[in-house]
């Protein structure tokens, strides 16, 4: 009995130790899970390239949305300063050498594709299409600042290419298809402003005095030019021989004197 009694406190300590160990294991699992979730979230956020976004091109007349297409980057035209040409016609890919693509609308046209991420940074080995001339070139993207993108188009050798600077759109632009809301400052209105309504003419009461004209010596009533008489022209007919002679006065009758 004594041995059993002596063992009871030890047994209680063992159970207490097991409970603390279990709680520690559970707490450790919770911490590991939280850290893992945070790491996955951070990795997912860091996997989105900083080049992704809406960029206004060097001309300021169009904007391209760069996005992830599979494991590469691509870009489509999403905003145009002018959505129609001088004749009021929609803009189409009319310079494309492929006749079947000449009717493609410029709005929504893909102009960037197959851009692969380089180990040294940036993206390269992609293609860019210039609808102004209907030609495609190799292209590379380099982010020189958070809101500055260097776009280099080239044929064969990159160092012999031509570089353009695009800037990140700082506010939402109205999509060229009319689906996006108008931006505050960066947006360019695509429709002409409404003309101001003409003010109705107010009839002046008869006999109203002309407005006074201020002069150095005071105010004097404005002089109105006398109305010019309308010239009347009478068409001369063939039978009009000329002006008619004036009528002769009738001779006066003599009155005989009364007898």
Image: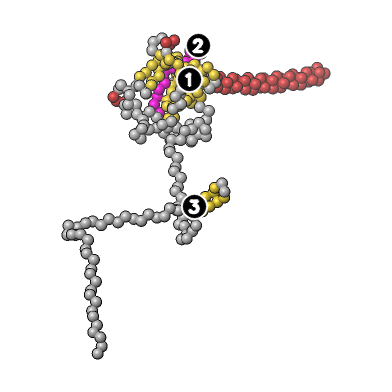
Q: Considering depth in this image, is 149 or 160 the residue closer to the camera?
A: 160
Where does the image place residue 232, in percent across and percent down from the top left?
30, 56
Residue tagged by mark 1? 165
Question: Which numbered disc, 3 or 1, marks the residue that appears first in the sequence?
Answer: 1
The mark total stands at 3
Magenta residues, as a range? 108-123
What residue is shown at x 24% (from left), y 77% (from top)? 252
- Mark 3 and mark 2 in contact? Answer it, CB < 8 Å: no
What residue is shown at x 34% (from left), y 26% (from top)? 93
What residue is shown at x 20% (from left), y 59% (from top)? 242
- Between the residue at mark 3 and the residue at mark 1, the CA separation in whole angstroms equals 62 Å
Q: Report crowding for label 1: few under 14, some 14 to 19, many 20 or more residues within 10 A (C-alpha).
A: some
Label 1: state its secondary structure: strand
In the picture as drawn, the residue positioned furthest to the bottom comes out as: 259
90 left or right of 32? left
Residue tagged by mark 3? 222
Q: Say above or below: 191 vs 15.
A: below
Residue tagged by mark 2? 119
Q: Quadrant of the C terminus?
A: bottom left
Q: Nearer the viewer, mark 3 or mark 1?
A: 3
Q: Say above or below: 206 vs 177.
A: below
Q: Quadrant of the N terminus?
A: top right
Label 3: state its secondary structure: loop
**Residue 2 visible at all:** yes
**Mark number, residue 64:** none
């Amino acid at each position: 009995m004594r041995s059993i009694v002596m063992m009871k406190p030890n047994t209680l300590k063992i159970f207490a130790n097991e409970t603390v160990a279990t709680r520690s294991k559970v707490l450790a699992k919770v911490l590991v899970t939280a850290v893992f979730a945070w790491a996955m979230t951070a990795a997912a956020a860091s996997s989105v390239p900083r080049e992704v976004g809406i960029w206004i091109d060097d001309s300021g007349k169009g904007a391209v949305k760069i996005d992830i297409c599979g494991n590469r980057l691509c870009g489509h035209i999403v905003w145009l300063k002018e959505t129609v040409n001088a004749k009021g016609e929609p803009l189409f890919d009319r310079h494309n050498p492929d006749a079947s693509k000449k009717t493609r609308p410029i709005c929504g046209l893909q102009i960037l594709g197959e851009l692969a991420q380089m180990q040294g940074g940036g993206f390269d080995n992609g293609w860019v299409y210039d609808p102004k001339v209907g030609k495609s070139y190799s292209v590379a993207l380099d982010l020189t600042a958070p809101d500055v993108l260097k776009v280099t188009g080239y044929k064969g050798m990159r160092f012999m290419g031509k570089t353009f600077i695009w800037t990140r759109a700082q506010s939402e632009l109205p999509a060229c298809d009319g689906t996006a809301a108008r931006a505050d400052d960066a947006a360019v209105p695509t429709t002409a402003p409404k003309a101001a309504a003409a003010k109705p003419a107010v009839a002046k009461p008869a006999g109203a005095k002309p407005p006074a004209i201020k002069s150095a010596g005071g105010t004097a009533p404005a002089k109105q030019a006398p109305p010019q008489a309308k010239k009347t022209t009478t068409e001369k007919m063939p039978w009009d021989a000329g002006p008619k002679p004036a009528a002769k006065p009738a001779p006066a009758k003599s009155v005989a004197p009364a007898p």
